[in-house]
Image (cartoon, rainbow, N blue to C red):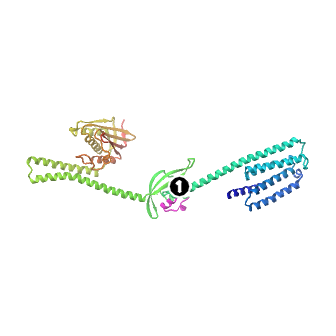
Amino acid sequence: MSEDISALKKKLNALIAFRIIFVILLFGSSFFFLGFERFPYIRSISYLVAFLFMATIIYIYLLERMRDIVPLAYTQLVLDVIFEIFIIYFTGGIDSWFSFTLMLTIIASSIVLNEKAGFIIATLSSILYGILVILQFYGVLPVTSGGYMEEKDYLYKIFIHTIFFYVTAYLSGYLSSRLEKTAQKLKERDLNVRDLEIFNREVLENMPSGLFTTDMDGKVVMFNRAAERITGVQRDSVIGRKIDTVLPFLRSPFSEGRREETIKADGLKKIIGLNISMLKGLAENMQGFIVIFQDLTQLKQLEKEMKQKEKWAAIGELSSNIAHEIRNPLASLKGSIEMLKEGSVPDNHKERLMEIALNEMNRLNRVITDFLTYSRPTPAEFKIFDLHRLLDETLELLENVDQDRSNVSIRKEYGGTLEVKADPQKLRQVFWNLGINAVEAMPEGGELVVSTRNADRLVEITFKDSGSGIDKEHIEKIFYPFFTTKEQGTGLGLAIAYRIVEEHNGILKVSSSSGIGATFEVILPGSYEKA
């Protein structure tokens, strides 16, 4: 309610100011252009103007002291209509040029009060103007028309003015009500926008992540509370300045994306992760940058500790596997040597015990050799060579390695000449291990398909067998050192192949399901293709 009274006071103040300015301009310009001789009742008009100014002073006085100012508003508007009727009477009545002032008062009533007030003032204006014209027609008032006019002319004047008054009341009331509704909607929208702005500010201030925005030149526009806490810098000292005064590694223009940097805050070294993106306006125009960052120091420390624990766990598991792989051959060697030492073994069994001892020593040597290959690889010697020729040589050896597996067929699906830059000896070992693994997975026979593909500067070599496949619980462990499901395997073949492919910045992938075979895919970068 107090807001409505305040708004009405502002409108009445505006009406008072408009009335004074309008009267001064109206009569000042009339006297200047037309002269005093055109106004026969100049003294009466002067009294009216003086009365109007005195009434204005009273209006101003009452406006500051009255609680209910609606009656005061109606009083002003009614007195304005009466004042204008007198002006019309003193300036010729039906011939007066000042009848338009009544329409101004009707418009003012609709704006200051409401549409209803506009129709009330229009009705009052119509009645008073009609009475004035009728009294003039019957000669009651000493005002004569400038020309001969009949009764219908007077009636027409009353009719047309009445129509104009009510049309003015309707139009001004309609526009005023629409303006009021629009103003109310804008006010509500402004409140909603303000509430949303406050909510957004509170959300940004209470975010656990640091956030700041800059303009296109890198000057800081916003700097939230978390940004202060992480950087140790107060926002007052950075707002309006370039961000590189706080974060020296951020120099305009920024590059979008994720990055990690190190800062020094409160005497401590911190690792922060930043995400930089463009700040766009509603019209998709670039306005600056928005940066969200977090303190990753504790997280990095935890990651380091976890990696250290995983490292020691892997070393422990590896040591356990090595001990297991070495203990079995040593047990066989020990038993064979003890039996030979006792001398109680028949001659026909001595040769068999010696053969067992030699086989176990060879097995030990193979385990140690494979382990050294895995744990201490020799540096790769890169050179350009024909990959298909290397595959052909490896597959030819694979076909002749075990005559008992002649029921395994090898099919090649590649053509032309494909050259790569890699270490041929290391890749030969990869292909050999993958091939042996595939052949051993098909004890009952089957087919090994070896294919190559050159696409998007990548070379893909695929070994696909039709063997028993790999169980789901084993497929994630097959590249672990010493993991094997074979009785005679060391569990290092696939681990060595994986390490070699990594040395070549490549990827070794496997896909398989139990009973449907396995597919190993070697992906190497940087291919060279001959025409």
Where is residue 502 drawn, in percent x and y? 34, 48
Q: Nearer the viewer, residue 366 or 46?
A: 46
Queried whether the magenta region covers residue 231, the answer comes back as yes
Q: Quadrant of residue 162?
A: top right
Q: Nearer the viewer, residue 426 or 73?
A: 73
Where is residue 520 drawn, in percent x and y? 32, 42
**In the figure, 427 relative to 64: above or below?**
above
Q: Residues within 10 Å of mark 1 (few under 14, many from 20)?
A: many
Left or right of 62, for residue 511: left
**In the figure, 227 relative to 529: above or below?**
below
- The quarter of the rendered structure image containing the C terminus is top left
Where is residue 518 drawn, in percent x and y? 31, 41
Mark 1 element type? strand
* Range shown magenta: 219-239
Queried whether the magenta region covers residue 334, the answer comes back as no
Q: Quadrant of residue 8?
A: bottom right
Which residue in the protein does label 1 denote?
A: 213
Q: Is residue 282 visible?
A: yes
Q: Residue at x 23, y 50 (%)?
A: 367
Q: Residue at x 37, y 57 (%)?
A: 304
- The quarter of the rendered structure image containing the N terminus is bottom right
